[in-house]
Image: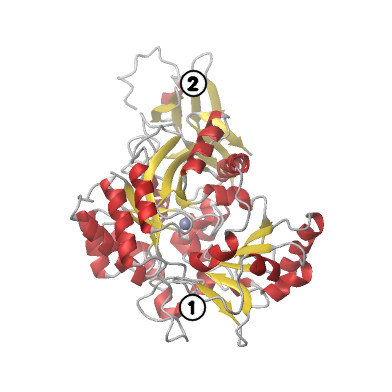
Amino acid sequence: PNLSMFKMEIKADLLLLNGIVMTVDREFNVVEAVAVKYGKIIATGTTSEIEGLKGKETEVIDLEGRPVLPGLIDSHLHVVGTGLLLSQINCRTPPMASISDICAAVKEEADKAEPGDWILGRGWDQVKLSDHRNPTRWDLDKVSPENPVWLTRTCGHIGVCNSLALEIGGVSKDTPQPVGGNIEKDEGGEPTGLLEEGPAMILVRRHIPPTSFEDTVKAIKLASKAFSEAGLTGVVDAGIDSTTMRAYQRAADEGGLSVRVNMMLHGKIGDETPDESVNRINDFPITTGYGNDLLRFLGLKLLIDGGIGGRTALLREPYEDQEDNRGILVMPVEDLQRRVDAGNLAGMNIGIHCAGGGAMDVVLNAFEQTNKKRPVKGRRYSIIHAYQPTEENFETCRRLGIVVASQPSFLYYLGDSYHENVGDERSKWLKPHRAWIDNGIKVAAGTDSPVTPYLPFPSLWASIARKTEVLGTQMGTEQRVTREEAIRMYTIKGAYYTFEEGTKGSIEPGKLADMIVIDRDILTCKEDEIKDTVVLRTILGGKTVYEA
Ligand SMILES: [Zn+2]
């Protein structure tokens, strides 16, 4: 290595020796060893070269041939939701195989709770349940008559509640359908308990006691610990309010933040009117780039449609077997534009949840419009999820420098429901990472946890394999990315997304010493084994924050 810039008496704080260190630098060089000082990488090279930086106080880790990667970055998830989930009923499959399994878990909680306490859970996917249908209020009433129940579907865009919760929310046969949402009703017009999209879900959800500040801090710490164990050293928390930002600061001050966080302010909180949102954005005291290496403000997050799994993503054509259903636009186009313009003029980076192609067209048009008010190029605006790009979308993204925040994990965990909802042909083009990259557009990876588990390796693998979890269906083999590309999407591209490619995302001198030691060489192991990679050690700024 080039050590000439360091006087030779400089000794490292930490050495990693005898490993397979994937630097993820421009050439994807693999070296044996790394030296760290003051939380930063000072040199990489062969073991014998790096050993020369060993002093009396230097901590030395012998990797014994194990691979090292830059710390992984999840470019789109929800930290508090993830932390709270760790303390709510986990309705995912596995462990839940059927609605009766979910009901049994609800009963167990209800038996422990005081009457009136809310029972909360998250993560069901009807496609994976043996019943092959959504739970209803009648299922839940049997096990929790005296406690309101609210369960959120895996996508986060659909909820189901029991009759008591419906009553508390004032939802009945006569409740009109809210704009941008749907109260599912049976043939007799009775609500089934299923509420689709924010405007419908809010009717019940607003009665759930808000998470206290202390509980928010706790959830952040819980999630942070889980992220370190999973090998994440950076995350983008998309769509939070200023109180949550303060909770982050508390968690960090108390030493409870072991992952670097980029925070995105929510562009619409609760049932805020456009005026209220615009005022809040205008009054927000900080803008993109403010903060430090641990906790930074990235920008504004907006959301305009749902997900394909729940048939609420806004498509360009109808869903399978439902000629009149193209999905839901949750915010009128004019209102979206007002919020986008406010964020733009406040100097903010903006990322917008747009899953279906119809929603992508709306969002990219909003970026085009706001670009006339203040240029967007170079400000790394993003489209989040972005399943169905067209050639025209590629052109717009290239021209405006739009980044894609994609979640390969969706193909694995949610892919079976995609197949059912948009059919075989359209499934092949969902999240076409190959095409994005070949069109010169930067793609950062993630999981949208708690929508899918925050574990990075199943998601990283899914961008390569594109296989669904239950049936193992391959979703468009021509859209596979290479292993190197998959790793870049989880490291340097994530750093790029948050303007931090100069300090994060690769193992190069001068960068923060964020690294993970893993149990297998994911460049050479069998493809399907990438998914089960185990993290042995997570190092953040030169300090071990997790060790298996
Ligand atoms: Zn999200």
Answer with left or right where residue 92 lies relative to residue 197. Answer: right
User: In which quadrant of the rendered view does residue 367 lie?
Assistant: bottom left
Q: Tell which of 61 and 227 is nearer to you.
A: 227
Q: Position of residue 111 (x, y in %)?
A: 81, 59
Instruction: Name the residue that disc number 1 marks.
Output: 421
Q: Tell which of 34 and 262 is nearer to you.
A: 262
Q: CA distance from mark 1 to mark 2?
A: 54 Å
Q: Nearer the viewer, mark 1 or mark 2?
A: 1
Q: Is residue 261 visible?
A: yes
The answer to whether 181 is drawn above or below residue 19 in the figure is below
The residue sitting at 36% across, 58% down in the picture is 274
The residue lying furthest to the left in this view is 372
Q: Which mark is residue 13?
A: 2
Answer with left or right where residue 23 lies relative to residue 114. Answer: left
- Badge 2: few (under 14), some or many (20 or more) residues near its Cα, within 10 Å? many
Q: How is the image coloured?
A: secondary structure
User: In which quadrant of the rendered view does residue 402 lie?
Assistant: bottom left
- Badge 1: few (under 14), some or many (20 or more) residues near its Cα, within 10 Å? many
Amino acid of disc 2: Asp
The residue sitting at 78% across, 68% down in the picture is 143
Quadrant for the N terminus in the image: top left
Q: Is residue 505 visible?
A: no
Q: Secondary structure at mark 2?
A: loop
The residue sitting at 49% across, 52% down in the picture is 77
The answer to whether 447 is drawn above or below residue 468 in the figure is above
The answer to whether mark 1 and mark 2 are in CB contact below 8 A is no
The answer to whether 509 is drawn above or below residue 517 in the figure is above
User: In which quadrant of the rendered view does residue 388 lie?
Assistant: bottom left
Quadrant for the C terminus in the image: top right
Amino acid of disc 1: Asn
